[in-house]
Amino acid sequence: MADHTLLDPSWFAYDTPGLWNNYTHNGLLYLYTSDGEQKSRWIQMIRDKKPDQVEAGCSECRQGILLRVLGKSGDAVYDYFEDIAREV
């Protein structure tokens, strides 16, 4: 698995603290399932549980869901992952 980060100066302010527009922490969570209906339920749950303190995006993969999160504290990212883990 490769992790790709697009570096485009027209999209990001590289002269500010943090690579991701003042976000200082990032996290990745992979939820494994091959059940299409379960993926749909989990994606909706991920959207519903997203707190205002983070930005998040998920991708549906062949065998699961990949979730990337940006936050301004490690606790915010961790707490979001904990909320998701309690549901799955």
Image: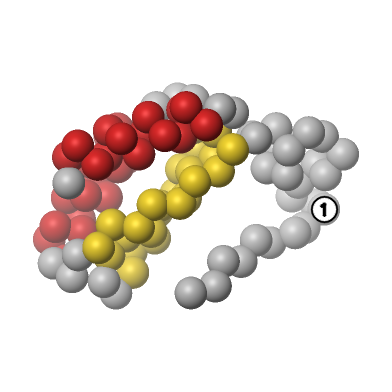
Q: Is residue 77 above or below residue 5?
A: above
Percent coordinates x, y for residue 68 in the rendering: 47, 50
Please report the residue visible at 50 percent of the width from the left and 37 percent of the height from the top.
55
Q: Which residue is mark 1?
A: 9
Q: Residue at x 20, y 58 (%)?
A: 39
Q: Is residue 22 left or right of residue 68?
A: right
Q: Where is residue 75 shown, x and y percent of the image?
A: 47, 27
> Which quadrant would residue 24 be assigned to in this image?
top right
- Vertical relation: 83 (above or below) 13: above
Classify residue 71 as left or right of residue 7.
left
Disc 1 secondary structure class: loop
Of residues 59 and 32, the one nearer the viewer is: 32
When asked about the image quadrant of residue 5, the answer is bottom right
The furthest residue to the right:
15
Disc 1 residue type? Pro
Q: Residue 58's spot in the image, x, y percent?
A: 40, 53
